[in-house]
Image: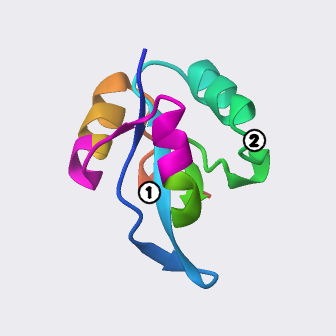
């Protein structure tokens, strides 16, 4: 049971964004998000988008910071990854 966060580097809406994922279940991911006041609207099929200003708080709450590459590998290995071609 691990929640992971990558480095905020995706620009949009006047800030940069990070991704938060679980490497075991969406239930775990949603529970972590709820416990840390992440809005459900920031969920995107297999991850939450979070603004850079929240990264340190989420790490303090237990998310483990990894590179974007490591995040994708662990998400893919978990079976939870939604491929770009499957997004609508």
Q: SS class of the residue under badge 2?
A: loop
- The image position of residue 75, as x and y in percent, is 36, 35
Q: Is residue 82 magenta?
A: no
Residue at point 28%, 27% (across, down) = 77
Residue at point 44%, 57% (across, down) = 84
Label tally: 2
Q: Nearer the viewer, residue 77 or 19?
A: 19
Q: Is residue 87 something one can see in this rendering?
A: no
Q: Is residue 70 left or right of residue 12?
A: left
Q: Is residue 57 magenta?
A: yes
Q: CA distance from mark 1 to mark 2?
A: 27 Å
Q: Nearer the viewer, residue 60 or 42?
A: 60
Q: Quadrant of the N terminus?
A: top left
Q: Quadrant of the C terminus?
A: bottom right
Which residue was labeled with disc 1?
84
Instruction: Point out the frontmost of discs 1 and 2.
Output: 2
Q: SS class of the residue under badge 1?
A: helix
Q: Earlier in the sequence, mark 1 or mark 2?
A: 2
Q: Is residue 18 left or right of residue 43?
A: left
Residue at point 36%, 51% (across, down) = 6
Q: Write the start and end of the magenta stretch as one range.
A: 56-70
- The image position of residue 24, as x and y in percent, is 44, 18
């Amino acid at each position: 049971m691990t929640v992971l966060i990558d480095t905020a580097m995706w620009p949009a809406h006047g800030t940069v964004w990070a991704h938060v994922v679980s490497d075991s279940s969406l239930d775990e991911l949603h529970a972590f998000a709820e416990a840390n006041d992440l809005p459900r609207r920031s969920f995107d099929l297999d991850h939450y988008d979070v603004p850079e200003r929240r990264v340190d708080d989420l790490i303090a709450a237990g998310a483990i910071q990894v590179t974007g590459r490591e995040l994708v590998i662990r998400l893919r290995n978990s079976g939870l990854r939604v491929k770009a071609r499957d997004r609508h």
